[in-house]
């Protein structure tokens, strides 16, 4: 009775080991703060020689003797030449971001000096870090799993409360903890089922089918919830596209300005002046909305305007939400009803908004039976209610923002594969298929689960993931 | 016998004390790193409540108990809301940059998160720092004198080795140590001379005139050397303006490109195409040269070109060095001699450079008796020799770059006042003027010496000096 040698989790440590060997000996350096003249800048080193190299440049004190998590003030010198007065933060492996020895040289915020410090580190044996290489090392050293590492990049890019909170949740484990547990349980079953294959003549069952069935159901539900959360996750990460459409002079540009509280778009009384689609971004309750202003959707003989009109139809199809703005005063009930009918065809996820409601005695009576919101873009009347409507439209029927949310397209793709494999396992068990076929489906599920958390990786994938990071992270 | 109460050094501590009171109670916060998406950013706090405020946001550990110069890793939280995972560098007064309690929160490099952290600090009692306010506090706490504080700004702005080294020298004391010593000695004499005034009926001399004379001479020499160094200091800080002039087709643009190793200027065979002056910057041996390309100085009927020509004369007058480029092949000895005669009038600090020397059998023989350098801009022949000539032209007769150099226009102005006052003291002593008049001149010298190092300051001046700093420094 031998342990099957093809178990995925037995293969990976070897791959990682080989990959780590490539890095083992070299020490990386990079400017970790943004480029530009500022009060301070931070140059970061990681690797076996990080402390040695820093020590060579720091004659004030012998850093080889000091403890980790300590600060040291002094002159940074390259030979006789003073480079700067600096503060050095020293971290010893494994208690550091990367899990290796790390030093951070906090210097004056002169790009010239920062470059000199990086060059001095290189001259003394470090090499320039690739984008994301510090985080990649943290991953390879087991300080972070892959979803956590990816969340670091998301956190740096975060620009709303929702994206920040989703990234922070993932950095602190997020759903990868849950997936890892489920995967470990599934691995045990997989091992038992593959063992059964060695004893196929004897018709034994090492793996308890009831328990396996239970596990499969749990995985299925978890994965379905996560898949479901991606729509919101995507919105959190990339924002919600809102196409603002309506006839010329309905007040689209005024509404855009009212939402933005600035005058980015051209506002004019002349019909059809807003020919280009203008994209502006606003943050409502932590959700990013990309507002797309479009030319009017009226048919026109003006060629340039016609292009604008064609574009606006495209934008409507492409949008997450279409905000249809009509002039509650000037437009007739028939006209607005007609527009709504068109909308239903183009993109059913729309909001009807009657503008210039201050000019009508009772707009909701005039357009009775229509689910519309009445505002005045000019006087900002009910614009807040419109914002609220937009937020509700996004969150409606979605996962609570407090729960775990998949924001990463790579995770989403892998989860879809997991769902498909788990479905096949379930169908296979229902149909009582042979153990060897069942084992294949389970292994497929294990593979894609492992891909999410980085237990299954390949070099190209890793390089791709980390290449999207900043230098110095 | 009472100590004279009007002694300048007795007044200042009181002013400083009053000024410090204004600051005493409040804690300042600012982003210290450059703005932009990056690996990490640093938010800095200084003041009595710096540790308290940071502690409120850092539930992982009680920072009120920890020692100075320590690092702490954990979650930054505003109430229940996680802001980021951070590393906190904690410095306790007086062992910090400002001399107050200081914390530096090293967070992820998301501008959104950095803003949230700064806002959370403000919500818990800090206020946003003004530009340079951290360094201003360091000055007010006596951690730096004024020239050192100013050198911090120079260091951040440094973009060549010379400007970096000059700033570093001044941060570490530079000439202010020498001036302070001389000023202290002069204060003693001043006190004694003013004492003599109380005993004017008795014709006593407390102050040894020979020693005073010796001191005056030392101050005079020191100040003269420092004043002399400013020309180089200014060059180090602001660069050397080099106007490249010459007839059309002499090869000015080609030379500019050869010096720059890139194709910024328009290069063309058509005479007079370079009509606008183009400013490019190169760094030769740590000195910044601003290369100004000009239109040809030939008279022209083309109006646009004529404007270019007028401009080029202005640029020549304004330049630190005029580089006159002539075509060693096509131009006659008479033409080049004529140009040199014009140059002597416009700006005597010029270098004659014969281009296209590769086309002439022996250029130095053709233009015998002329102090010119012969190059080929096209083949880069002798362009390095030209660079060397430019550097020598700057350093010629100047203070050695290793010695103390005044780079600051404010210091230069004060030193000029010191020189004038010291001159008056010397003349007064020679003429045996009454002690009360001598005392006035000495006090004038003391005032301007003190102004340089910040022992004599006024609030407006301080505010002006520090307002030119970065926020967060």
Image: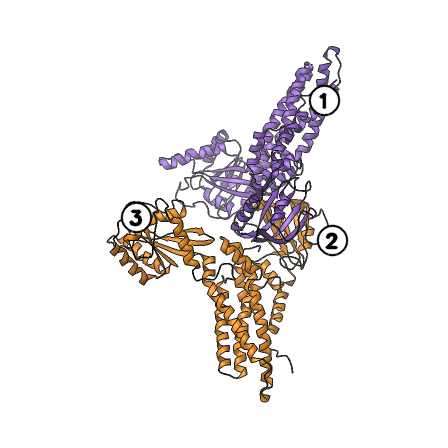
Chain colours: A purple, B orange
> Where's residue A364, x and y in %?
53, 40
Mark 2 Cα shell of 10 Å, populated few (<14), some (14-19), many (≥20) = few
Residue that carries the numbered disc 1 in the rendered image = A189
Which type of secondary structure does the marked residue at label 3 adopt? loop
Q: Is residue B181 above or below residue A179?
A: below
Outermost top residue = A201
Q: Earlier in the sequence, mark 3 or mark 2?
A: 2
Outermost left residue = B301
> Where's residue B189, x and y in %?
58, 77
> Where's residue A421, x and y in %?
63, 22
Q: Is residue A33 above or below residue A404?
A: below
Q: Is residue B230 left or right of residue A126?
A: left
- Viewer-closest of B312 and B107: B312
- Viewer-closest of A45 and B379: B379
Residue that carries the numbered disc 3 in the rendered image = B273
**Share a chain, discs 3 and 2?**
yes
Which type of secondary structure does the marked residue at label 2 adopt? loop
Of the numbered discs in the image, which one, if any, rests on residue A25?
none
Q: Return the chain for callout 3.
A: B
Which type of secondary structure does the marked residue at label 1 adopt? helix
Q: Return the chain for callout 2.
A: B
Residue in the picture at 43% in, 46% down? A267
Residue that carries the numbered disc 2 in the rendered image = B65
Residue in the picture at 53% in, 54% down? B156
Q: Return the chain for callout 1.
A: A
């Amino acid at each position: 009775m031998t342990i099957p040698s093809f178990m995925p989790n037995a293969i990976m440590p070897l791959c990682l080991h080989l990959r780590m060997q490539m890095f083992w000996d070299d020490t990386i350096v990079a400017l970790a703060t943004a480029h530009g003249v500022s009060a301070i800048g931070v140059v970061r080193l990681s690797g076996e020689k990080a402390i040695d190299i820093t020590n060579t440049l720091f004659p004030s004190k012998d850093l080889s003797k000091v403890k980790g998590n300590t600060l040291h003030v002094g002159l940074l010198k390259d030979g006789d030449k003073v480079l700067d007065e600096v503060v050095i933060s020293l971290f010893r492996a494994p208690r550091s971001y990367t899990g290796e020895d790390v030093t951070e040289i906090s210097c004056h915020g002169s790009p010239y000096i920062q470059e000199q410090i990086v060059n001095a580190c290189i001259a003394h044996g470090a090499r320039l870090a690739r984008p994301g290489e510090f985080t990649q090392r943290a991953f390879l050293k087991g300080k972070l799993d892959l979803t956590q590492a990816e969340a670091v990049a998301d956190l740096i890019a975060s620009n709303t409360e929702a994206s920040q909170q989703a990234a922070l949740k993932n950095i602190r484990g997020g759903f990868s903890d849950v997936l890892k547990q489920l995967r470990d349980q599934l691995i045990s079953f997989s091992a038992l089922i593959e063992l059964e294959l060695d004893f196929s003549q004897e018709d034994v069952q090492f793996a308890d089918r009831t328990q396996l069935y239970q596990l499969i159901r749990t995985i299925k539900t978890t994965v379905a919830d996560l898949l479901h959360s991606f729509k919101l996750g995507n919105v959190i990460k990339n924002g919600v596209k809102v196409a603002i459409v309506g006839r010329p002079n309905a007040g689209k540009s005024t509404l855009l300005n009212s939402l933005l509280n600035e005058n980015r778009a051209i506002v004019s009384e002349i019909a059809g002046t807003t020919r280009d689609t203008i994209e502006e971004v606003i943050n409502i309750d932590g959700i990013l909305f990309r507002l797309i202003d479009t030319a009017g959707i009226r048919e026109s003989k003006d060629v340039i305007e016609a292009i604008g009109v064609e574009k606006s139809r495209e934008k409507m199809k492409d949008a997450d939400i279409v905000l249809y703005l009509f002039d509650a005063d000037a437009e007739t009930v028939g006209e607005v009803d007609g527009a709504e009918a068109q909308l239903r065809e183009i993109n059913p996820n729309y909001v009807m908004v009657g503008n210039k409601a201050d000019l009508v005695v009772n707009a909701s009576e005039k357009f009775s039976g229509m689910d519309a919101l009445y505002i005045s873009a000019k006087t900002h009347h009910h614009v807040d209610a419109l914002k609220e409507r937009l937020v509700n439209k996004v969150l409606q029927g979605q996962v609570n923002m407090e729960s775990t949310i998949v924001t990463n397209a790579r995770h989403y793709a892998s989860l879809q594969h997991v769902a498909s494999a788990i479905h096949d396992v379930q169908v296979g068990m229902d149909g009582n298929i042979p153990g060897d076929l069942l084992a294949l489906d389970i292994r497929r599920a294990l593979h894609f689960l492992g891909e999410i958390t980085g237990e299954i990786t390949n070099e190209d994938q890793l390089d791709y993931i980390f290449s999207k990071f900043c230098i110095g992270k």
